[in-house]
Image (cartoon, rainbow, N blue to C red):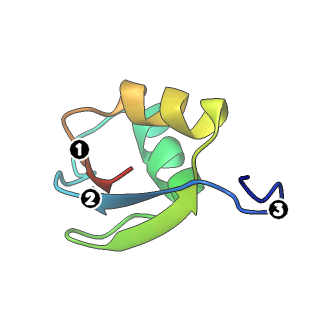
Amino acid sequence: MVKADKKKTIRLRQIGSPIRRPESQRKILIGLGLGKMRREVELQDTAEIRGMIKKLPHMVEVIDS
C-alpha cells in the first residue's frame, strides 16, 4: 500500500543561460526557482511544473523523476 501523503518529486538543473531570451522564458525560470547556470532544484511533480519544463527544453534538464 502506497502512502497517500508521499509526494512525487522531480529534480531539475538549469543548462541554458537566460541572456538574450524572451521575458516569458525568464519568468518561467524564476517560477521554477532557477535563474543561474547549473543551479538545481527539487519540485513536486505536477502537471503545471511539467508544462513549464516543456516550454524550456533547451534550458532545463530533468535529473530524476
- Residue wearing tag 3: 5
Image quadrant of residue 49?
top right
Nearer-N-terminus badge (1/3): 3
- Residue wearing tag 2: 14
Mark 2 and mark 3: span between their CA atoms?
Answer: 28 Å
- Amino acid type, mark 1: Met
Which secondary structure, mark 2? strand
Q: Residue at x 28, y 38 (%)?
A: 21
Q: Residue at x 17, y 55 (%)?
A: 15
- Amino acid type, mark 2: Gln
Mark 1 and mark 3: span between their CA atoms?
Answer: 31 Å
Report the number of discs. 3
Q: Is residue 44 left or right of residue 36?
A: right
Mark 1 and mark 2: span between their CA atoms?
Answer: 6 Å
- Residue wearing tag 1: 59
Q: Position of residue 32 (x, y in %)?
A: 52, 54
The answer to whether the residue labelled 1 contacts the one labelled 2, judged by CB atoms less than 8 Å apart, is yes
> How would you rate the neighbour count of disc 2 (Cα within 10 Å): few for under 14, some for 14-19, many for 20 or more?
many
Q: Is residue 24 above or below residue 39?
A: above
Nearer-N-terminus badge (2/3): 3
> How would you rate the neighbour count of disc 1 (Cα within 10 Å): few for under 14, some for 14-19, many for 20 or more?
some
Nearer-N-terminus badge (1/2): 2
Q: Position of residue 53 (x, y in %)?
A: 41, 36
